[in-house]
Amino acid sequence: MILVLGGTLEGRKIAGVLAAAGFRVMVTVTSGYGAEVMPRDLPVELLVRKLNATDLDRLVRQKNIRLIVDATHPYARVITETAWEVSQKRNIPYIRFQRPSVTEEFQGEAVFRVNSYEEAAKLAVSKGNTVFLTIGSRNLEPFIRVGREGRKRVVARVLPDAGVLQQCAALQIPPADIIAIQGPFSLEMNQAMFREYGAEVLVTKDSGITGGTDTKISAALGLKIPVIIVARPDYGIIPVTDNVEVILENARKFSGY
């Protein structure tokens, strides 16, 4: 069986390609939302669970996994490093699908690149009074903390998921500063939101075209709003590809089919 660590559009596509080629596939997602967007007719085994190293190691053994395909989000560093470590421990081939970057094309005095969320938060509050976040829900805390210290408004655009909204509630983010909506969005839609909320600085991630990063940045720059981009993690020696055919070749080579 091939294990696809999914939860992304690419994960769903890769699982579909592998299943169509005749491979037995298990897909893991971490939330109910991830399960909801999985195509109902996709002939795969679905596991909805956040996996730690012990869980993943047990799963690999119980399901006789022959190849791990990591198609998680570009910023899902913990599960990526965990999957790589388990693959090395069990001597199982591993490959990560990494969507191409789109931020290199954006340059200029209004584009800032940082290596951490803490750094991004401190820079953001120095650039404007209303900080508009499109970084997901897992790293909101430093922005909320620094924003309150500087008496800045922080608007968080997040997925409309119950767990995500609970995280926002735990951080005591006012409902008026939460935009719970599923993207990606067009340039015009992004600009409409930025205008509506009075955004003065945008913080985003390099989530590629799939994540709508290009239109977010273009929309902000078109309104002369500075953009802060949090860099992707450096995965070092972990094998990476942006080609689904390479994934399929690995499946044929290592799965025993």
Image (tube, rainbow, N blue to C red):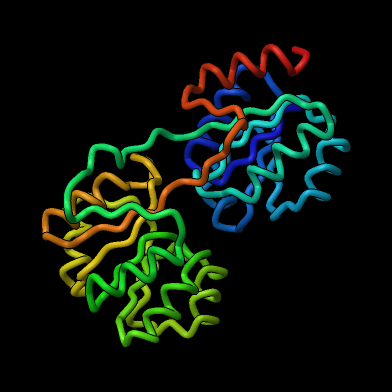
In the picture, measured across the screen, residue 94 lies left or right of residue 201, that is right
Write the residue at 68% across / 52% down. Answer: 48
Residue 178 occupies quadrant: bottom left
Q: Position of residue 211 (x, y in %)?
A: 38, 46
Above or below, 205 against 15 in this view is: below
Q: Position of residue 75 (x, y in %)?
A: 51, 49
Where the C terminus falls, by quadrant?
A: top right
- Quick one: which residue is furthest to the left in this view? 223
Above or below, 181 against 29 in this view is: below
In the picture, measured across the screen, residue 62 lies left or right of residue 213, that is right
Q: Position of residue 83 (x, y in %)?
A: 70, 40
Above or below, 130 against 30 in this view is: below
Closest to the observer, 198 or 29: 198
Above or below, 48 against 203 in this view is: above
Where the N terminus falls, by quadrant?
A: top right
Closest to the observer, 222 or 231: 231
Q: Position of residue 209 (x, y in %)?
A: 33, 40
Q: How many marks?
A: 0
Write the residue at 58% across / 35% down. Answer: 236
Write the residue at 19% across / 57% down. Answer: 220
In the picture, measured across the screen, residue 187 lies left or right of residue 10, that is left
Write the residue at 88% across / 38% down. Answer: 62
In the picture, measured across the screen, residue 57 lies left or right of residue 208, that is right
